Image (spheres, rainbow, N blue to C red):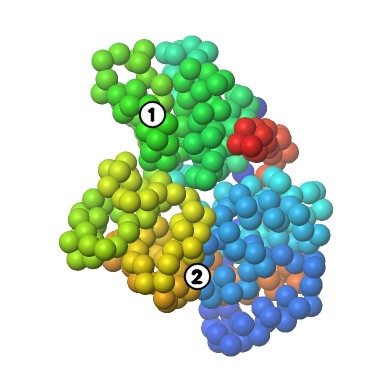
Amino acid sequence: MNLATLFTTHQQLPDKYQHMSHDEMIERITMIKKDMGEDLFIPGHHYQKDEVIQFADASGDSLQLAQVSAQQKAKYIVFCGVHFMAETADILTNANQKVILPDMRAGCSMADMADDKQTEEAWRELTALFGDTLLPLTYVNSTAAIKAFVGQHGGATVTSSNAKQMVQWAFKQKQRLLFLPDQHLGRNTAVELGVPLDQMAVWDPIASKLEFAGDSVEHIRVILWKGHCSVHENFTTKNIEQVRKNHPDMTIIVHPECKYEVVQQADLAGSTKYIIETIKQAPAGSEWAIGTEMNLVNRLINSHQDKKIISLNPFMCPCLTMNRIDLPHLTWALEEVWEGNYTNRISVPNEIAKNAKLALNRMLQGSL
């Protein structure tokens, strides 16, 4: 199968939306939502700006939103997230539904760190070294092409919520696993399951090289793709030291996309959903330093004013690519849909979608 780049139409935001007033955009979005009714569904990822999330019909993580979108009667899914999330929604929705991404520039740096050509080359090199002992897993934060590659080779997708169960599942299938594209989630999950660091290696796709500090490659059980989240990698152990010094009563909770050292020194680590639920259930007066995307941290601060909440890194910026979806782009996308145009439609080719769905379905079965 040729895992070629997915082709989509992309147009620049027309100038008129740059000059619309805030109130006019709010009015137009509200009118279109009311007029289209059940024909329109707007999922919004947790990391979206408040100006966008206020119009979301559902908010959540990427896979959750794709699954919810597939359950709708809506003809149009205007996905407020990033490219790979809209791809997953297109894979899971039916042929009569059209998925729109308000700004095609809303990508994911992590997903972009693994493309199909690099993955095919890595697979050739690694299977030559390890034979038929290797199974690929990919984080859902990956392109449809990578999901398809994994599905074609017997592997599955994982989320930050079910990574532990899926790594356990993978080890029941094969002796070793290749974990794409986030090395930190893979490393933190494997350590939690008792795999020592000296049984892990890192595949560098730029150098086409296996990085391994152990005695023998025969001992390698987990091969981590050299990728990362540009937001979560910016949380450091120095941030933790500063919080411990200035706020000794604070509980530090981080996302498992953070570096191994950060996760080890934090009090708690878990998925976005885990972080949200933990803060929600925490008693009034409790104190928290959160290591995840800034839009979400600010939303948690505003929603739980009975608790003291700060970002683990006070200089952290919101996810830049996620923030490309703003009020002007949302207004434009909705007006285009309302007028019957499919600007910035995400359409995954059938062969890629079929194999990607295999990987997604194996996860849904394996994590039960």
The CA distance from mark 2 to mark 1 is 38 Å
Q: Is residue 216 visible?
A: yes
Q: Is residue 316 visible?
A: no
Relative to 150, does residue 241 appear above or below in the rendering? below
Quadrant of residue 158 within the rendered picture: top right
Extreme residue in the front direction: 283
Residue at the disc numbered 1: 194
At horizontal 50% and vertical 38% (from top left) the residue drawn is 163
Quadrant of residue 71 within the rendered picture: bottom right
Local secondary structure at mark 1: loop
At horizontal 51% and vertical 73% (from top left) the residue drawn is 50
**Viewport quadrant of the N terminus:** top right
Residue 247 rendering spot, x and y as whole percentages: 23, 65
**Viewport quadrant of the C terminus:** top right
Residue 354 rendering spot, x and y as whole percentages: 71, 35
Local secondary structure at mark 2: loop
Residue at the disc numbered 2: 49
At horizontal 38% and vertical 27% (from top left) the residue drawn is 195
Quadrant of residue 152 within the rendered picture: top right
Between tags 2 and 1, which lies in front? 1
**Sequence order check: which comes first, mark 2 or mark 1?**
2
341 or 183, nearer to the observer: 183
**Circle number at residue 59:** none
Q: How many marks?
A: 2
Relative to 50, does residue 351 appear above or below in the rendering? above
